[in-house]
Amino acid sequence: MIEVDKKNFEEEVLKAEGLVVVDYWSPKCEPCKELMPHVAQLAEKYQGKAKFCKLDTAANRRLAISQKVLGLPTIA
């Protein structure tokens, strides 16, 4: 999984070709932590068919809001 932030979000997600899945999470979000291993399994299963990224919303709050992420966990 590719870690994205405000520096590389546009290139890795918005300008990417093909299917992109973004896991929006936060270090304080327990359900997010529980979901992470499952998302990692999906990333392995669909490697080469979809790009999987994760975004720490605590460190990138404005970016998450700009993407209409209003609650966690969110996978989009």
Image (tube, rainbow, N blue to C red):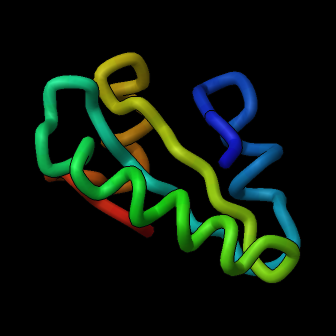
Residue at 22% x, 51% y is 34
Asked if 66 appears above or below 37 in the picture, the reply is above
Residue at 48% x, 38% y is 55
Which corner quadrant of the image does residue 48 belong to?
Answer: bottom right
Residue at 12% x, 39% y is 30
Q: In the figure, is residue 4 to the left or right of 23?
A: right
x, y percentage for residue 9? 67, 40
x, y percentage for residue 8? 74, 32
Asked if 32 appears above or below 19 in the picture, the reply is above
Q: Looking at this view, is 62 or 31 the one in front?
A: 31
Q: In the figure, is residue 20 to the left or right of 33?
A: right
Residue at 27% x, 32% y is 26
Q: Looking at this view, is 5 or 43 the one in front?
A: 43
Which corner quadrant of the image does residue 2 belong to?
Answer: top right
Question: Farthest residue in the top direction?
Answer: 59
Quadrant of the snapshot with the C terminus: bottom left
Q: Looking at this view, is 37 or 54 the one in front?
A: 37
